[in-house]
Image: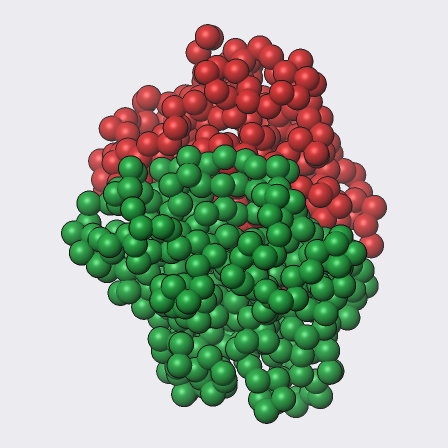
Chain colours: A red, B green
Amino acid sequence: MIKKIGERTLTFTEKPRIIGFGSAVGKKEGEGPLAKWFDKIYNDTTMGGETWEKAEASLQKKAVLLAFESAGVQQSDIDAVFAGDLLNQCISSSYGLRDLGIPFLGQYGACSTMAQTLAVASIFVESGAADIAAAVTSSHFCSAERQFRYPLQYGGQRAPTAQWTVTGAGSAIVASLENGEFKSQNEKLIETNGNLKKQTGVSDVCIGKIVDMGITDANNMGAAMAGAAADTIYRYLTDTNTSPDDYDMIVTGDLGRIGTSLLYELLKKEGIDIEKKHNDCGLLIFDCESQEVCSGGSGCGCSASVLCSYILKRMRKREINSVLFAATGALMSPTIVQQGESIPGIAHLIHLVNVNDR
Amino acid sequence: MIKKIGERTLTFTEKPRIIGFGSAVGKKEGEGPLAKWFDKIYNDTTMGGETWEKAEASLQKKAVLLAFESAGVQQSDIDAVFAGDLLNQCISSSYGLRDLGIPFLGQYGACSTMAQTLAVASIFVESGAADIAAAVTSSHFCSAERQFRYPLQYGGQRAPTAQWTVTGAGSAIVASLENGEFKSQNEKLIETNGNLKKQTGVSDVCIGKIVDMGITDANNMGAAMAGAAADTIYRYLTDTNTSPDDYDMIVTGDLGRIGTSLLYELLKKEGIDIEKKHNDCGLLIFDCESQEVCSGGSGCGCSASVLCSYILKRMRKREINSVLFAATGALMSPTIVQQGESIPGIAHLIHLVNVNDR
C-alpha cells in the first residue's frame, strides 16, 4: 500500500524488492575507482555500433539484459519498463529496448532519470499495476558532447566547472510482494530470489519539483542542480522527521565538486549538515585529478551505473543498510539556453533499505 | 484498486475521475471543424513569446491553468504533474510548468503522450500515490517543423503522406475516490465536482509496446504508428473480451489518412472491424481539403487538444458514454533516421466511461 507522509513523500508498506540489477560502462569509467564493481566494461567505446547513438542504445540494452540475468527473469516476465536518457527523443531507450517487446513508458528527467524510473517502477509494483517492472537509463560521453556542446573533432577546451558525461548504463528490476511472498509465480525468479533476506527494498520515494537557480552557464550544471537536490533532501527529511544520522549514506547523482559544495551550503541554511554521510556519484566514479574530468562525472548513466553496482552490491553485502539516493537532473536544452533562458533542475529521492529478516 | 486483466490491461475498481480539463490551440486549429469546442484559440501563433519554443511552453501552461480552473483546483492542490512533448529535452513541459511548484514527472511518448500521461496519472491516483494529478502535453507547428524537418523560411514542399503538426495543448485533472467520495478535502473541488454523476472516469488502461513497421520515411509517420495502434487495440479488446460494438467511439491519436487505412487493414487480418466506431484526432481537427494539411494533423497536441475538448465535453453531455482513446506516437528522431534507422511506433490506450449515477 502507498501512503503519503508530510508534503510529498510516499511510503510503501510492502517495500518493492530490487531482485536484480546490472551495470555496463565505457573504458574511462572502467579505469576509475569503481572499476571492480561494474558488471561489464567496454574497451571499445562504440560498443560495436556504427554511431555514438547506436553505441549508447547497445549500452542501455546490455544493462537491462544483465539486470534480467541477475534477477533470474526474462523479458517476457516484465510487465513494464521505465526508461529514458539525455538524447533528443530519448532514442537510446526506444532503440535500445525496441526488440524486447515489453510495455514501455518513456521517462524524461535528464540526469535524475535513474531515480525517476525506479520511483515510478516501484509505485507500479506496489500498487499492483505491475508484478515485475524494470528501470533503466544511460548516457554516453560522445553522443552527449556532440548533442549538447561541440563535435568531438572540434577539441574544445573544458571549463573548470564542466563535468564529464559518463559512458554508462544501469538497470534495476523491482518485484512486488504480497504477504511476504513474491506475487509472480515465475519459478526461476523464486529460485534466484527466494531468500528475501538478501533483498534490498524501496521504502519511500520523494518526487521532485522543478527548481531554477537562475544559472545560464551550460558548463556549470552542478550549480543548476544543487537547488533541486537541496529542496528534495530537505523535504524528505522534514516529511519523515529524520536526520542525516539516520542513514548510512546519502548519495546525489551528479552534482560534482561545485554542485556538492553548493548543496552543503544550501542545506546548512536550513540547519541540516549532510557532509559526513554524503557522497556524489559524479565524484565516486572518477578520480577527478588523475582522470582529468574537471568537476566530476555527470549524465543519466553516472548515477545509474553507480547505483546499480557499487551502492546496491554494498547493500547486498550488508556493508550499508539504509541509503538515500537522490539523482539530480538539469533540464537543459541547447536550443532554449541559446535563447537566454536559465537551466532548471530537478531531483527525485529514493530511500533504499535492507529489509529485516522475516 | 488496480487489477491486471489478460496480458497487459489494467482495470481500476474506483475509476479515477476526470474532474477538469482544458484545451488551447493556434489560429489554424481555431479555423477547423472543432473550433467551437476549444477553450482558448490564439490568433497570434507566438502566444506573445519571443521564440516558437517559448510559445509552445506558454500554450502548455495555458492548457494546465484552464484545466485547474475547470476542476476548481489550484496548483498547490496537485500532487503530481505528468507532462511531456516533442521538443528536444521536453522543454515545453519543463519551461512551461517550471513556475508552478508541482512535483514533476517528465514523460516521453512522442505523440502518444496524452494517453501516457493520463494513464500514469490515473495509476498514481488509483494507487494512493496522488490524490489529484494532472496530465498535459502540447505541440506547436513552428517549433516542430524546424526541429524535425526544415526551417519555416525554407518553404519546403510537403509530401502527400505528410501530416501537419497541431499547434495545441490539452490537460486533464484526475482525482481519486474512496468509497464514492473524493479523497481530497478541498472545498472548492468538492463544490465544483460534488455531483459525481457528471464525471467521466478512467476505467482501464493498456500500456503499449514498441512496434517497428520498418518505415524509414519521416514524412510517413501515420504508417510508422499504425502497427502500434493495431497491436494495442487488438490487445485491449482481447484482454477485455470485448468488441468494437461495445464502445461509442474508438479514437486514435494522429494516424491521419494513411495510418488510418493501414490500421483498418491490420485489424481486419485479426478479424476486427473498427471502421464504424473509429475516428482519428488528426482527421477530426482539420478539414484536410480546405485546410491543405495533406494527410491530417499530428503532434502530441493533436490528440491532447481533441481529447480535452471535443471528446470529454461530449462525454460530459452524455452524447457518448464509453470511449477508447488510443494516442499513437512515432518515436522518431532526425539524428537516428539520418543514420538509416526505421521509425518505431507506440500506442497507449485509455478506456473512458461515464460512471453510472451512484
Answer whether residue A297 is visible to the viewer in this image: no
Please state which of residues B250 and A197 is positioned toward the viewer in this rendering.
Answer: B250
Q: Is residue A345 above or below residue B159?
A: above
Horizontal arrangement in the rendering, residue A265 relative to residue A176 (left or right): left
- Name the residue: 68% across, 17% down: A187
Tell me where residue A229 sits by quadrant. Answer: top left
Identify the residue shown where x is 63% and y is 16%.
A190
Q: Is residue B198 left or right of residue B112?
A: left
In the image, residue B189 sits, relative to residue B9, either above or below, namely below
As drawn, the residue found furthest toward the front would be B245
- Expressed as whole percent of the image width and height from the top left, the position of residue B198 reads 30, 58
Q: Tell me where residue A222 appears, x and y as whole percent.
A: 45, 49
Q: From this viewpoint, which residue is outermost toward the top?
A: A358
Which residue occupies the foreground of this view, A293 or A102? A102
Q: Residue at x 36, y 67 (%)?
A: B317
Q: Nearer the viewer, residue A56 or B254?
A: B254
Q: Within the image, what quadrant is residue A33 found in?
A: top right
Quadrant that contains the N terminus of chain B? top left
Visible residue check, residue B67: yes
